[in-house]
């Protein structure tokens, strides 16, 4: 999938819809608050605000969305209930925050090892049944899933060279609890619990050898390369989904032209997010590669497939934890197998 071509086509369609709406311009009809899981200073927060501005423009001012940072109205893991109850009208967040309600949120939100590029996940959502399955998961909570974005495949920090799965054995690494830890443990690593705020110090002091943290540009900007001189890019392990959802009762009451604008605007938002963050990552990678003390490592397709196979064994265990988790497992593995990304 070429995100630029797709995004351009979608945007052209949205402009056509907007032009028709503009022939009978109306005053503002809907004013909503969406809470994001991003902080105001995060590099993707302005991209989320730009999406809200675009929706206002394309709806001819009929929809006005205010995007507020994490924790503004409710805690980061409470937005699902808040949107369903109408306290918030929507959210832009990582679905895996809600895995305590149903493990399927983790499987659809950050299926460790599944995706090697955002385009793979976008294609699954749009053409592989992912969007319908996500709505089957969130509709009972009172939400309508509009679409998915992503910050891209996360990089991987390491103080030691890791050229493949075998090199993970015995590596002490920071990883979030849950599926991420379970997958890395199955691959032979030794995961430990650490908040993100302690990753830099833990690498500096040798408490950990490696870390699952975030995208390359953020890692580099925070100076992680001072100690983790063997970053892996693009990452092989984690690409959290960014879920854009609206209160279902509100969505169901919208006219069809506004539903179209909302649904398709998320595809343009996803393109913006990936394009801008890719540019930042590429600049940071170029800077790192120019440093003779840093070695940027890119795993081969074979090693990525090997890690994905290990991850699949843990996905299968999560699939047994709920009916929806089982559906997510069957759906994603069927898609990956069909696309030749997972051995049968």
Image (spheres, rainbow, N blue to C red):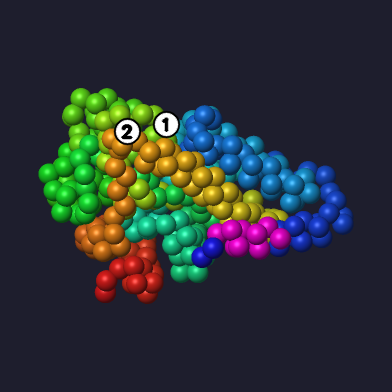
Q: Is residue 240 magenta?
A: no
Rendered view: 16 above or below 292: below
Report the front residue among 326 and 130. Answer: 130
Mark 1 crowdedness (10 Å alpha carbons): few <14, some 14-19, many ≥20: few
Residue 339: x, y in percent?
38, 72
Q: Position of residue 311 (x, y in %)?
A: 25, 58
Residue 263 seen in the figure: no
Where does residue 278 sit, x and y in percent of width and height? 49, 47
Q: CA distance from mark 1 to mark 2?
A: 9 Å
Circle number at residue 94: none
| 11 inside magenta stretch | yes
| Magenta-highlighted residues | 3-12
Residue located 30% across and 48% down the image: 297
Asked whether, in this view, residue 54 is left or right of residue 108, the answer is right
Q: Residues within 10 Å of mark 2 (few under 14, many from 20)?
A: many
Name the residue: 18% across, 29% down.
207
What residue is at 65 percent from the left and 59 percent from the top? Answer: 8
Answer with the quarter of the image where residue 7 lies: bottom right
**Which residue is at 35% across, 45% downward?**
155
Position of the C terminus by quadrant:
bottom left
Q: Is residue 289 left or right of residue 24?
A: left
Q: Which mark is residue 221?
A: 1
- Residue 275 in the figure: left or right of residue 188: right
User: Vertically, is 295 above or below 205?
Assistant: below
In this figure, which residue is indicated by the disc labeled 2? 225
């Amino acid at each position: 999938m070429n995100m630029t071509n797709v995004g351009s086509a979608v945007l052209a369609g949205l402009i056509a819809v907007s032009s028709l709406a503009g022939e009978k311009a109306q005053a503002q009809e809907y004013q909503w608050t969406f809470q994001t899981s991003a902080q105001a200073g995060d590099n993707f927060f302005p991209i989320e605000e730009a999406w809200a501005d675009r929706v206002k423009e394309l709806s001819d001012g009929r929809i006005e969305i205010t995007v507020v940072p994490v924790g503004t109205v409710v805690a980061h893991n409470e937005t699902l209930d808040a949107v369903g109850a109408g306290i918030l009208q929507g959210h832009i967040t990582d679905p895996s925050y809600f895995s305590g309600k149903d493990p399927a949120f983790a499987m659809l939100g950050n299926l460790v090892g599944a995706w090697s590029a955002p385009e793979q996940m976008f294609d699954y959502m749009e053409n592989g049944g992912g969007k319908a399955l996500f709505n089957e998961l969130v509709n009972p909570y009172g939400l309508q899933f509009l679409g998915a974005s992503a910050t891209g495949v996360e990089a991987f920090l390491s103080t030691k060279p890791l050229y493949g799965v075998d090199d993970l054995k015995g590596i002490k690494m920071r990883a979030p609890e849950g599926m991420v830890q379970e997958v890395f443990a199955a691959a032979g690593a030794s995961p430990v619990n650490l908040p993100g705020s302690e990753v830099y110090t833990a690498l500096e002091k040798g408490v950990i050898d490696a870390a699952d943290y975030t995208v390359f540009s953020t890692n580099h900007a925070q100076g992680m390369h001072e100690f983790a001189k063997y970053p892996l890019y693009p990452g092989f392990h984690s690409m959290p989904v960014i879920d854009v959802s609206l209160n279902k009762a509100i969505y169901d009451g919208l006219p069809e032209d506004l539903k179209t604008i909302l649904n398709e605007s998320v595809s343009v938002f996803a393109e913006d997010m990936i394009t801008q963050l890719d540019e930042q990552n590429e600049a940071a990678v170029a800077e790192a590669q120019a440093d003779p003390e840093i070695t940027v490592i890119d795993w081969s397709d074979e090693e990525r497939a090997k890690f994905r196979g290990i991850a699949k064994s843990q996905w299968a265990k999560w699939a047994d934890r709920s009916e929806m988790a089982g559906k997510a497992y069957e759906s994603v593995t069927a898609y990956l197998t069909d696309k030749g990304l997972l051995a049968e």
